[in-house]
Amino acid sequence: MLGGKNVKVKIDRDLYDRLRKVSDVAGYATTEEFVAHVLEKEMLHFEDAGSDDDIRNKLKGLGYIS
Amino acid sequence: MFEFLKRVFRRQPGEPIVVVSGLPRSGTSMLMKMLESGGMEILSDSERAADIDNPKGYFEYGRIKDLEKETDKSYIREGRGKVLKVISFLIKDLPDDNDYRVIFMRRDLDEVLASQNKMIHRLGTTDTTATEAAMKEAYRNDIVRTRLLCRDRPNFELIEIGYKPTIENPAPTARSVNAFVGGHLNEAAMREAVDGSLYRNRGKS
């Protein structure tokens, strides 16, 4: 099954246990679903500059964007 | 494969545009001054005059401020073979019909924010309501975004230059930058252009 849709990522056992607990309480169907959701959200910080109003407001104040 | 060939034959990027980038107050004007002293032509309109925050000038091209909103970006081609200052937040908005050599300035984030806050205070403009910690996080993300973008787009090359190491010893920076842009600059003049007295917002370390 080379090139399958899913891949494995190794993480610390203690972290996994914490993730499993929170995903249960938060109502996720699986820990994997929770982890994927958290990572998707976190990736937006790096991939979507347009959403960063803090930077935009700071740059306007400094006169670097209009 | 077809898309790749199409892109290769469609683009006629000419000479690369040297882009000096980084967060505002990270030493971009210092690097611009080094490049100008070394013999490179700057794409600038001198709209923003030298002031207490940048006594040697800003080296900016005013229209760049609208880069995020403008649809016609063909004027960027004027920068081919020249140097253009573009803050890191706007790198994503550079058009793909040019090749870019990005010189990315890095400076301690506490120093950057301290300098920015002083500048905003002097300008009397509106600041963000974000906390210092939130701004540091936002800027860290901005730096990562710039690195990712330069890695993903084939017409971008990136070199990172430290502000503090350059102030302390300009020679390695002059050498690296000169090699990065083609090796035709006057490195002695580049070194001379660095004025350590302008390093006013120093971190604790």
Image (cartoon, rainbow, N blue to C red):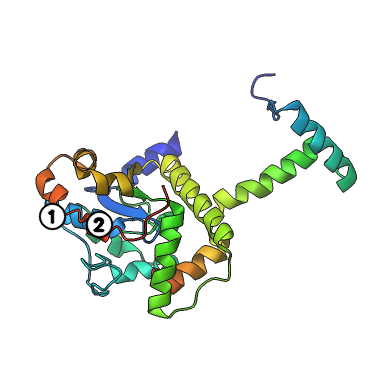
Of helix, strand and loop, which one carries label 2? helix
Amino acid type at circle 1 is: Ser
**Residue beneath disc 1:** B37
Indicate left or right for B106 with B84 as reference: right
| Residue at image location 64% in from the left, 24% down from the top | A3
The one nearer the camera, B199 or B182, is B199
Residue B193 image point, x, y percent:
16, 54
Q: Distance between the residues labelled 2 and 1?
A: 11 Å
| Residue at image location 42% in from the left, 76% down from the top | B121
Q: Upstream in the sequence, badge 2 or badge 1?
A: 2
Amino acid type at circle 2 is: Met
Task: Please say whether residue B69 is visible from this viewpoint.
Answer: no
Q: Residue B30's mark?
A: 2
Q: Indicate the chain on which mark 1 is placed.
A: B
Give the tally of numbered discs: 2
Vertical placement of residue A26 versus B44, above or below: above
Q: How crowded is mark 1: few (under 14 residues within 10 Å), some or many (20 or more)?
A: many
| Residue at image location 49% in from the left, 49% down from the top | B145
Residue A29: quarter of image = top right
Residue B130 image point, x, y percent:
58, 66
| Residue at image location 54% in from the left, 71% down from the top | B128
